Each structure stands twice: as structure tokens, then as C-alpha cells.
Image (tube, helix red, strand yellow):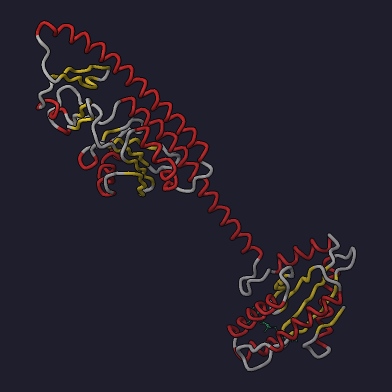
Amino acid sequence: MTSHGQLLTFRSQDELRTSHYHHYELKGEHDVWGYIGLPTAPPEDALQWVTVLIDIAAQRLHLLKAKHMAERQLGLKARRRLLSRDIKRLTSLADFLQRHGHGWCDIFQASGIALTHKGELYYFGECPDRQQIFQQLGYLDTTTDQDSTIELDGDCQGGLAAPLNLASNHLGWLLIFRQHAMVTPGDVTSIAQLTFWLPIEASMVLELADDLAVAITALDVVHVNRQLRKTNQRLESLAHTDLLTRCWNRYYTEFVIEELCASNATCAVLMFDIDDFKRINDTYGHPTGDDILREIARLATQTLRSNDHLGRWGGEEFIVIIADVTLNEGICIAKRLRCHIEQHSFAIPDSVTISAGLTTIRTDESPRQLLERVDKGMYLAKTAGKNQVMIC
Ligand SMILES: Nc1nc2c(ncn2[C@@H]2O[C@H](COP(=O)(O)OP(=O)(O)OP(=O)(O)O)[C@@H](O)[C@H]2O)c(=O)[nH]1
């Protein structure tokens, strides 16, 4: 029993019974909802007046209680609006609880609030531990219907569980925990019979559970969309990429050249081929040949500027798109690349060189004409002794 000045608080009905207080029951629509106590029993002749006064007080208290409940319902409405506004910004259930847990606990006069979803537990405030909660839920999952709340008992006494009707097949729960019973029905003899939640509170919890189910479903959709976007990006990049060298593949290089020709872009195109690559393969084996192809792609990418692009045309042939340059600037870049490769120490004792054809895109020419010209330049570089760039 706690004393707040003139106000006394009884924590249980037993405490009230064993006190010297003479008490009267306050009866409402859901059985007894409270007591009024007098320090001593009133004299017999005043009993009738005391009863009248208590009735008046009971009505006043009932009104106050109804007003208080209406305020809590309004509070819940405001919180639900906040939640629906917040849905787009929320990133996880833990985030949900961090942002809203305090407000929900306030409205439900609860000490803690928890959510379970896909076997995970998220909580705010004081809740029983994970094992105690899942033990209770394991039983509820198989017995509870989907539209009503249930008061928990045992280790989770004081808890009210509301199912989350999610779009996915996973069953989730909203759990709200309260430490002290709100209502002590008429003839309570054992603590197990205590009711911690009023029916109106249970229906408020169900409303919140409905909103949470919508929010969680939205969160799941956001998550699936994010996964899809990532998968699409990955697929797109795979469709553009040569798996051995990680540079553009022929399909994508051709596509970009078509676009450049169609837009009459100012741009140089270099086609190069590794010299005597067959001999390298024959001498050191195909895997070493593959390493050299990878290394050449790496060196070329390093040498080029960020807006230039390297594509593997096939076998040991590559194409470089040198963006926004005149022929002279293109020649400088092509020579730098040839030198860089010639001077690089590869994992084999032989020096590795390239022969290249270089040209710029001419007005209104087709991709085919451009590629034939640059291929011819490369052929001329080979026949002229290799390890050189031929302008065409
Ligand atoms: N390791 C490896 N070798 C490849 C790959 N693609 C093509 N080749 C080889 O590249 C070699 C190309 O040989 P050729 O066309 O005769 O040309 P080359 O030996 O470079 O002679 P030149 O072009 O005249 O300098 C062949 O042995 C192909 O098998 C690949 O992905 N990996």
C-alpha cells in the first residue's frame, strides 16, 4: 500500500481486504472496476447517506474514467496517423519500435511492447525475455484465431498479444506488457485470475496491430523491391560485361558504337590485338594466356581516362572508345597505351605487345564502315611489323 497524501493506493485486492478500510465496490459494464474506501465503517444511521454519496462519487469517477479512456483513444488515433505517415521512412522493425514504442507504451499504460515477425523478436521497454515470449507464442500460434487478442499468463502475465494479419504467410504478434492489473474482477482469489486489460483496450491493441501489419507488409515490399533492383543491376552489368576481363563485352561495345555513329559523336576508336598470342598460349598454356588477357584489360583501363571505355571484341582483340577527342589527341592516348603494355613486366619472360588501328568517327558513316576501317588499320600495323599504331 502506498500513500500519496490523502490518496491511498492498494496494489491488490488482498491488500485492500486486509486493511482496516471499509470499502465499496464501483460496478461498471465490465464487472467491478474500482473501490471507494472509508477509514472507518459509517454509523448505522448515516449508512443510507453514505451510499448515496458513494453513488454520486462513483458516477463522477466513471465519467472521469470514460474521459480518460476517450483521451487515450484519441492519442492512439494520432499515433496511428503518425505511423502511416512514417511508413515510407521506416527501414526496420527495430526502427519502428524505437520511434513509436514510447508513445504506444504511454497510450496503453504499458511497461513494454514487443513485435515478433519471421521468428525475430523486437522490443521496447520492459518485456519478458525471448524464451518466455516464444514459449507462450508457440502455444498461441496453433490455438488462437486471427482476429482477437489474448491475455498471456505464466512468465508473461500482464501481456496482451494481438496477431498481426500479414500479407505474407508469416504470423507475427504485437505484444504489450503491463505490470499491474487494471481490473480486479469481483471475487478474485488467485492472482492467475487477474485481468490486466479492459475489453476496450484490447480492441485498441487490435487496431494498432492492424496498422502494424500494413506497415510491416509495406516494409517487406520495400525490401523485396530493393532486392529486385539489386538483382536487375547485377543482371544488367552481367549482360554488358566480359566475364574473363570484366570490361564491356562485344554485344555492349557494338551497341555503344552504333549509338555513337548515330549521334555523330566526336570520338576516336582504337582496335588492338595482342601480338603472337598463339605462341604465348602454346608456350605457357591457356590459363597463362587468360592471365595475360586479364592483365592487358587492367593495364588498358588504368591508362585510359575515366570517360574512355574498353571492350573485348573477341579472342585477343579489344576496342577502345576514346571519348571527345580529335585524331591527334587519340594518337597520344593510343601510343601511351601501346608503350605502357610493351614496358609492363608480365608473369612470362617474353615481352607482350599490341598492334592497333586508330580512327575517328566520320559524319554519317555506319558502324560497319567504321569497324572495317579500324580493322584495316590494325591489319596494316601487323603487316608493318607489329607493336605499333596505324592511323586509318
Ligand atoms: N588464353 C586464351 N587464348 C585465346 C582466347 N581467345 C582466343 N585465344 C587465342 O588467341 C590466339 C590467336 O591467335 P592468332 O589469331 O593466330 O593470332 P596471333 O598468334 O596473336 O598472331 P598475330 O595476330 O599475327 O600477332 C589463338 O591461339 C586463340 O586460341 C582466350 O579467351 N584465352
Residue at 29% of width from left, 38% of height from top?
177
Q: Quadrant of the N terminus?
A: top left
User: Relative to the observer, which residue lies in front, 342 or 193?
Assistant: 193
If the image is split into quadrants, where does the C terminus sit?
A: bottom right
Q: Is residue 191 above or below residue 45?
A: below
Q: Which of 366 and 342 is in front in this view?
A: 342
Residue 217 in the figure: left or right of residue 164: right
Compared to 315, does 181 lie above or below? above
In this picture, residue 198 sits left or right of residue 363: left
Residue at the spot x=76%, y=82% of the render? Answer: 336
Ligand 1 resides in the quarter of the picture at: bottom right
Q: Where is residue 84 in the image (x, y as percent from the top left)?
A: 50, 36
Viewer-closest of 17 and 27 = 17
Q: In this view, does 226 lie above or below 277?
A: above
**Residue extending farthest bottom:** 349
Q: Position of residue 240 (x, y in %)?
A: 66, 64
User: In this rendering, would 379 be left or right of 211?
Assistant: right
Question: Residue 188 at what x, y percent from top left?
Answer: 15, 26
Rendering quarter of residue 347: bottom right
**In the image as oriented, which residue stretches furthest toward the front?**
5
The outermost residue toward the right is 363
Image coords of residue 22 (percent x, y): 13, 19
